[in-house]
Amino acid sequence: MTNEIKVDGACYCGKVTIDGSVSADKVMACHCTDCQKFSGAPFRAVAVMSADNVTIGAPVQEYLKVADSGNERVQGFCGNCGSQIFAADPQKTLFMVRTGCLSQHDQLVPVKHIFGKSAAAWLGSIDHQQWVTDGPASAEMEPATQK
């Protein structure tokens, strides 16, 4: 693999573990409306890995999603804590692992934004807003993009 990054991680409760490797050019941000709805966030960052390059260390709950296009995607999540783990084709040959579950999430910078037509319009200006270190009343800080 080109620019291979070894990854490991787990769901929030630690029941479902993840180990694998991803090429740095296979990290993406998906802005489709399904990802927005599933995550409750403006997009999901994913590391695209073949089945040969990822091991999911425990059984996951699955939901079969059918997109407007008719494409089917298996959504895998922890049945205990609800953490989203992956999306995959029905044959599970290609996994889109949610980077938030991975210890290396800071290294997994999306190199491509997909479904940009449904991206939240305000995303381009987010680094110009007020940033604080922790909760709403914590100290102000400069966002990482401005350092």
Image (spheres, rainbow, N blue to C red):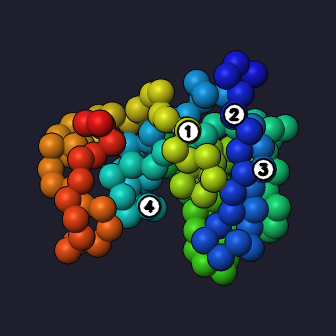
- Residue labelled with disc 4: 39
Q: CA distance from mark 4 to mark 2?
A: 25 Å
Mark 4 vs mark 2: give the one in front.
Answer: 2
Q: CA distance from mark 3 to mark 2?
A: 11 Å
Instruction: Look at 49% across and 35% down and name the residue there.
Output: 109
Instruction: Look at 60% across and 57% down and name the residue there.
Output: 101
- Residue labelled with disc 3: 19
**Upstream in sequence: badge 3 or badge 1:** 3
Circles 2 and 1: CB distance less than 8 Å?
Answer: yes
Q: CA distance from mark 3 to mark 1?
A: 15 Å
User: Which of the labelled discs sits on residue 85, or is there none?
Assistant: none
Expressed as whole percent of the image width and height from the top left, the position of residue 144 reads 33, 42
Q: Quick one: label 1, few (<14), some, or many (20+) residues within 10 Å?
A: few
- In the picture provided, is 53 more to the left or to the right than 119? right
Mark 4 vs mark 3: give the one in front.
Answer: 3
User: Which of the labelled discs sits on residue 107, or is there none?
Assistant: 1
Q: Quadrant of residue 62?
A: bottom right
Q: Amino acid at mark 4?
A: Ser
Expressed as whole percent of the image width and height from the top left, the position of residue 106 reads 52, 44
Q: Amino acid at mark 3?
A: Asp
Expressed as whole percent of the image width and height from the top left, the position of residue 23 reads 67, 28
Q: Amino acid at mark 1?
A: Gln
Circles 4 and 2: CB distance less than 8 Å?
Answer: no
**Which SS class for mark 3?**
strand
**Which SS class for mark 4?**
helix
Circles 3 and 2: CB distance less than 8 Å?
Answer: no
- Residue labelled with disc 2: 5
- In the picture provided, is 97 more to the left or to the right than 46? right
